């Protein structure tokens, strides 16, 4: 079987935006008011802790979702996506709410609805708009194409409304996007994806504290350290993922309740043994113990990774990435065969560290590798998938990129 690795490249930003403006003219017969875009993201470490007050360390990908948009005044959102062959979707803004509209247009029409509920103000939020979308973040790969789409729409609307686009303004937009995703799209997710898409800067990751939504920038000069961050989209998708996600959230909420703390962030890693003993006496104590151990040690790993990066020691974080994967696989039980295979093969072929990233049960893994080993690691992973008759994985180079903004 042919196992030449397929790399999924990001188009050049300016030309993608110009092409989309021309396509908008063809589709809607007028120029758009502008073109905006927002990136997908990959999380370096800090997985499954954004709903328990934890820390995470995502960076924006060079892969972006673009939106060309023009305001209307009749309360209608008319939207097309180059990734959705079924064609135009027309939504009356007055009908937007929980679970409505269904399908992909929820990630578009949900945004003005949510911005209105989050204190943004302006005719645009009720007047509607025409929009044409072009996404370069693969769907359902754990790289957050959904947040890229919401955040591209949010930054477009925010910009046209004259809302501040400093970090505080972006945090407010991120909050609206989370609300749109949770309520309108009906996807029960934490806040990491939208924060990354809106608040990251080129050349760095953000250390996001999900307890209070504060962000600090962490420089990540991979090239300067002779390193690369290889993303492996396993293209595996396991259908039970949504239910398991809800179950994990319920587990950590119950564990926090037993421990008498609002979130597991409040458990000091130095007191972990005592906490494990307490939750261990519940009827399903063994499961809860492992969930708590993952959350508390994972949050600690994020803090330690950020410290190393700040000390210019990107080459030393591999062990923390490995430990994160092992914890997600064994204690949190959210990995799967394809993710474990990727991580094992990457490590065996010289990766400094490798782990699943995103929600798990499929999606993507990352490997921190010496820049001159990227090809060799990708070859080895592709060959291992072919040998086991798995669907061919896809590869992306994660260069820390700029958050959402205006292109044209
Ligand atoms: P992920 O965010 O990990 O890629 P999700 O299931 O959360 O996966 O979001 C994927 C969904 O987001 C798609 O099924 C589609 O509904 C919507 N979406 C993302 N990008 C686009 C796009 N370019 N055009 C239309 N819909 C999109
Ligand atoms: Mg998503």
Image: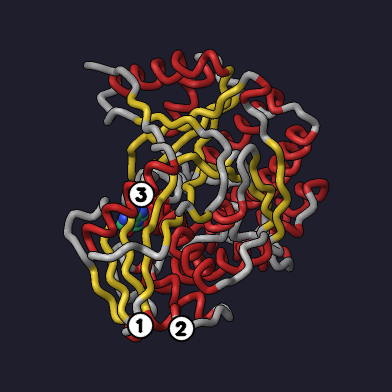
At a point 49% along the width and 27% down the height, the residue shown is: 343
Q: Is residue 227 left or right of residue 82?
A: right
Picture disc at residue 73: 1
Please name which of the two marks, 2 or 3, marks the residue nearer to the observer.
2
Residue 327 visible in the current orientation: no
Asked if marks 1 and 2 touch (Cβ < 8 Å), the reply is yes
Residue 289 visible in the current orientation: yes
Mark 3 secondary-structure assignment: strand
Q: Quadrant of residue 175?
A: bottom right
Asked if marks 3 and 1 touch (Cβ < 8 Å), the reply is no
Q: Position of residue 202 (x, y in %)?
A: 61, 41
Q: Position of residue 47 (x, y in %)?
A: 57, 46
At a point 76% along the width and 29% down the height, the residue shown is: 312
Q: Quadrant of residue 33?
A: bottom left
User: Which part of the image, by quadrant, shows the C terminus?
Assistant: bottom left
The yes-or-no answer for disc 3 within 8 Å of ligand 1 is yes
Asked if marks 2 and 3 touch (Cβ < 8 Å), the reply is no
At a point 48% along the width and 69% down the height, the residue shown is: 157
Ligand 1 found in image quarter: bottom left
Which residue bears the numbered disc 2? 123
Please, which residue is most extreme toward the right here?
A: 270
Distance, label 3 to label 1, CA atoms, is 26 Å
- Residue 178 in the image: above or below residue 368: below
Q: Position of residue 231 (x, y in %)?
A: 47, 32
Mark 1 is surrounded, within 10 Å at the Cα level, by few (under 14), some (14 to 19) or many (20 or more) other residues, namely few
Which residue bears the numbered disc 3? 135
Q: Pick whichever of labels 3 and 1 is earlier in the sequence.
A: 1
């Amino acid at each position: 079987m042919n196992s030449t690795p397929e790399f999924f490249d990001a188009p050049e930003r300016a030309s993608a935006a110009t092409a989309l403006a021309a396509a908008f003219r063809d589709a809607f017969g007028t120029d758009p008011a502008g073109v905006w875009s927002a990136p997908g993201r990959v999380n370096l470490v800090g997985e499954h802790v954004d709903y328990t007050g934890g820390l995470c360390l995502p960076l924006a990908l060079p892969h972006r979702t673009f939106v060309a948009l023009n305001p209307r005044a009749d309360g209608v959102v008319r939207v097309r996506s180059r990734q959705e062959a079924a064609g135009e979707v027309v939504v009356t803004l007055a009908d937007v709410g929980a679970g409505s509209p269904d399908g992909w247009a929820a990630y578009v029409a949900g945004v003005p609805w949510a911005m209105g509920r989050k204190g943004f103000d302006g005719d645009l939020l009720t007047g509607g708009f025409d929009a044409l979308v072009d996404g370069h973040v693969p769907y359902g790969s754990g790289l957050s194409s959904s947040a890229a789409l919401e955040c591209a729409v949010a930054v477009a609307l925010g910009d046209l409304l004259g809302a501040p686009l400093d970090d505080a303004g972006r945090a407010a937009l991120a909050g609206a996007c989370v609300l749109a995703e949770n309520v309108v799209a009906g996807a029960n997710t934490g806040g990491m994806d939208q924060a990354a898409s809106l608040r990251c800067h080129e050349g760095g990751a953000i250390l996001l504290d999900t307890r209070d939504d504060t962000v600090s920038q962490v420089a990540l000069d991979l090239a300067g350290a002779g390193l690369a961050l290889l993303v492996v989209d396993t293209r595996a998708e396991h259908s039970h993922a949504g239910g398991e996600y809800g179950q994990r959230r319920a587990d950590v909420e119950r564990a926090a309740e037993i421990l008498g703390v609002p979130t597991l962030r409040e458990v000091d890693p130095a007191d972990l043994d005592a906490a494990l003993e307490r939750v261990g006496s519940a009827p399903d104590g063994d499961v809860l113990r492992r969930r708590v151990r993952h959350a508390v040690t994972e949050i600690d790993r994020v803090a330690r990774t950020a410290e190393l990066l700040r000390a210019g020691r990107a080459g030393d974080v591999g062990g923390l990435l490995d430990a994160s994967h092992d914890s997600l696989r064994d204690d949190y039980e959210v990995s799967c065969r394809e993710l474990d295979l990727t991580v094992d093969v990457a490590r065996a072929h010289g990766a400094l560290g490798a782990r699943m990233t995103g929600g798990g049960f499929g999606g993507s893994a990352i490997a921190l590798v010496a820049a001159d080993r990227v090809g060799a690691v990708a070859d080895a992973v592709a060959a291992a998938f072919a040998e086991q008759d798995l669907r061919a994985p896809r590869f992306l180079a994660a260069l820390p990129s700029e958050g959402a903004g205006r292109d044209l």
